[in-house]
Each structure stands twice: as structure tokens, then as C-alpha cells.
Image (spheres, rainbow, N blue to C red):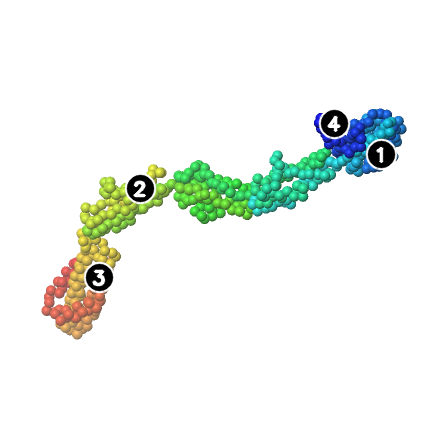
Amino acid sequence: MDFHAVCCTLLLLTCTGVCFGQELLLPERINKAVGENVVITPILIPDPPHFLITWKFNERNILSGPPSGIIILPAYRDRVSLDTTTLALELRSLTESDTGTYSLSVETGTGLFHKCGTSLQVFVPASDVTIVPSKTELVEFNSTVSLVCSASGSTLSFIWLNGSSEVTAGERVQLTDSNSSLTITSVIRGDTGPYQCEASNIVSKAMSLPLNLTIYYGPENVTVEAAPVGPIYSSGSTLTLTCSAESSPAAEFQWAVNGAELGEMGQELRLSNIQSSQSGNYTCIAHNKQTLRYSMSEPIDVTVLVGPDNVIINGPSEVEVGKTVMLSCHTESTPTAWYKWMFNGTLTEVNTTVFTVEQANVTHTGNYTCTASNPVTGRKASGSHVLVVKEKGTAGGGGNSLSAGAIAGIVIGVLLAIAGVAGLVFYFVKGKKIPETTSRGNKKNGATRNEGQHELHYADVSHLQSNQRQQGIPAVSMAHANSYVSQYNKTATSNPATQTIYSDVRNL
């Protein structure tokens, strides 16, 4: 036998069943699905005439007889037929029980016996493919999920798809139970799916419905945007801050300024009629109620321009020659104001908040004006302060010192008080002298008059003291007056000028 014949014989044997004799060959294996029909056609048959034909299933007869008188067993009578020319066997409405070995035997007229066998595998088609998840709501990085593929069919194999890509085993992915079980650990947001399971055998394949997982994540990448874009805004304008974050489900937002919570909730923070007190660093705090995680945005600066307003100059209004004077200018301004100083309407070179005068002299007396300007708002405001430089010892020293006019008033008041006392003494002495030169009855009447005159003198003294108090002049006490009376009683009769002094006092 040449090489070509040997190759053909080997190829034929690999495609056929086990056969006896070289003139009968059958296919090696046949696969069919339940419910289908199969025709087992011999690849090679002996030359006729064929005296006896027999088909068997697992060594049990299906049919037998000469071509003209084939007998089919009752179990196969409605399902089997034979082509007597090709010797092909047709088996209809296959079931799983039809799986097994089929053999054909042929006896020829030459007395030779030929036999060959093959196998038939009947499969239940894949169907009812479903995915059973351990859970469908997961937290990124925290959760593990298991998916089990359930299907009907015989001799099934499984593959998993995430979208259009086949899932393969890896660091976080395990495939077990002949690939029917898929486990994903430490899920990430890309693991949401959709997942499908494909179940198949040699005769069929079937696909499950897609399954999506819900994977909660975030919040992260929290950002704040301002409209209009800042960071500098005019006082009284309206500002809207909008917060965003990558989060599933959508994050909840709350707002803070300079680290202190505002109590405002929501994605937007609207600030109307903003004032300088609302300047600061605003942050948005995002919260995911499923992952229980928080995340804060980078601060966004909001600067509200204001002023300058309420320019005030602090400093003394009077100062002695030689002293140092410091005048301090303050104003409400955002951003910080620029300052200029004027002295008596003339611009100076001082441009700081403090104007300092070293060794003040009288030429420094005048009106000092501080002008504050806001370089952004363009507004200006001014305040003035009058400074008087006096000679040493003349500047106001506080609430306990007296002016020169007050001292002069006190001196005059004392002199008037002395004159008043002198007049009082004169009348007192005169009233005592009259009764001594009259009769007894007149003396009595004179005493009565003197008593009335005494009352008048005391009234005059009281009246004088009252006037002195009203004029701010220290009053002479009654004790001092009595001492003067005692002194002048000794000389009243010999001093005729006493009456004149009193009249002078009265005229005063």
C-alpha cells in the first residue's frame, strides 16, 4: 500500500466508528438536540445484494431483515425508518434516552458479515438562563457581590459578559463552579454592568437578561463655582455659589464660611445685597447618605468692597509746646484704604494712618484733614481734627484745674465777702449804741428795732452767700462772719468809716 493510500485510510478511520471489514463505515459521532430528527447515513456500504440488514441501539435491535422484509420493533415503529438503498437509519423526535451507541450489520451474498458502530449524543438545549445576585446595592471599595448563573440544559458551560466584554478571572474577580458563579470583591464604580450569563452546549446557547448593579460612591471632587465670577464684589450686589460633586446617589450639600456652618442646605447658596460682613472663605460640604462619607470643597474667596465710610481722627485737641502729637485716622473700608493728610488745606507727604508731630510749636496749630480712598471702589471720604498748640502751663490739664478767669472770680468773691462782713459789723455796733442814749421806754423800743436790724443783716449775708454760689465764687461761712463781728465790736464806735464801707458794699 503506497503512502497516499495509507493517509486516506487513517483519515477515514478518524471520521468513522469502530468497524469490522473495510467495506462498511459510519460517522464517528453525531450530536443532536432533544426533539430533533437524526439520519445516520453510512459513509461506505458493501456491494449488494444484501441478504440481512440489522440496526441496533446499545446492542438491542431496532430493526432487522432483508431489504424487502424489514421488521421494526414496536418501541420504534412510529419513530424509525430505513432507506434500503443507502441503508440509512432515520430516528425522529429524539429524547435524552436516545443517547448511546448505534451499530449496523450487513450480510452480503458472498457470505461475508460487515459491522460498524457510531455514537449519538442527544442534548437538552440551554434555556431559562437567569442571574441570581447576592445583592444589587453596593458601596464602592467596601462591598463584595456574588452572581450565580442558573440555566436548564444538559452538559452546559458558562461565560460571563460585562457589556460586550467577556469577564475573566483576576485579582478582584473569581470564577467558580465551572464558571457558573462570579464573585467580585471590593467593587468599584466600573463594576456596575450590565452583566449577562451565556449558557451553552454543543447544540445550543442561551443568554440571560442583563443585570445592573448599583454601586454607591463618593462624594469626591467637590467644587464651588461663583456667578458672577469673583472674588471681588460690590456691596449690595447678588452672588450665587453652586456646589457640585461626583457622588452616587447625588450628594447633599451644606455651606460654611470661615469654617463656621451657615445652616444653609442645598446645591446653591444665594447671597443677596451682600455686605462687607459677608466677606470670607466659603466652602461646600458634600455628604452621601449611602456611603456615609463626607467631602469638602476647596474654599472660594468672597471679598465684598465697602467704603471708605466713617472717617475718624483720634488724638488730642490741645497740646503744650514741645510735646509729641500723634493723630490716628480710621475708616471702614474693604480693601484697606489709602490715606492722605492735609494741614490747613495743604497736602502733606504723610500717607499712613498716623500723623506724627515731633516737638510741637504754635505753627502746628490748625486743621488736620485725613482723606481715605478705596483703590477698587474709587470712593473717597474725609475727616477733620483741630489741634491747638499752647504755651507751657496754659494747656488744659484736666477736670480739677481752674482757668485764669475762674481764679480771678474767686478772688473778687472773697473781697466782696469781706466787705459784706464789715458792713454787718457796722450795723450791729450801731444798733447796740442807740438804746444807751434814750429813755427806758425808748431803749426798749430801740432794742426791738435793733433785733429787726440784726435780722436784716443776717438776711443780707445769706443773700450774699446765695449770689456767690450762683456766680461760682466760694461763699464765706457764718463762722467766719461771727469772728469778724467780734473783732469789729471793739472799734465800732470809734470808726466812723464803718457805715461808709457798708454803703460801698451795698452799692457794689
* Mark 1 vs mark 3, CA separation in Å: 156 Å
Category of crowding for the residue at label 3, using alpha-carbon neighbours closer than 10 angstroms: few (below 14), some (14–19), many (at least 20): some
User: Is tag 1's residue or tag 3's residue first in the polypeptide sequence?
Assistant: 1
Which residue does the numbered mark 3 point to in the structure image? Answer: 474
Q: Amino acid at mark 3?
A: Pro
* Quarter of image, res 377: top left
Which residue does the numbered mark 4 point to in the structure image? Answer: 1
Element on which disc 4 rests: loop
Q: In the image, residue 421 lies at what x, y percent?
A: 17, 65
Q: Quarter holding the C terminus?
A: bottom left
Taking the spot 71% from the left edge, 38% from the top edge, the residue there is 156
Q: In the image, residue 107 lies at what x, y percent?
A: 85, 30
Q: Amino acid at mark 4?
A: Met
Taking the spot 42% from the left edge, 42% from the top edge, the residue there is 301
User: Is tag 4's residue or tag 3's residue first in the polypeptide sequence?
Assistant: 4
Taking the spot 67% from the left edge, 39% from the top edge, the residue there is 158
* Mark 2 vs mark 3, CA separation in Å: 54 Å
* Mark 1 vs mark 4, CA separation in Å: 38 Å
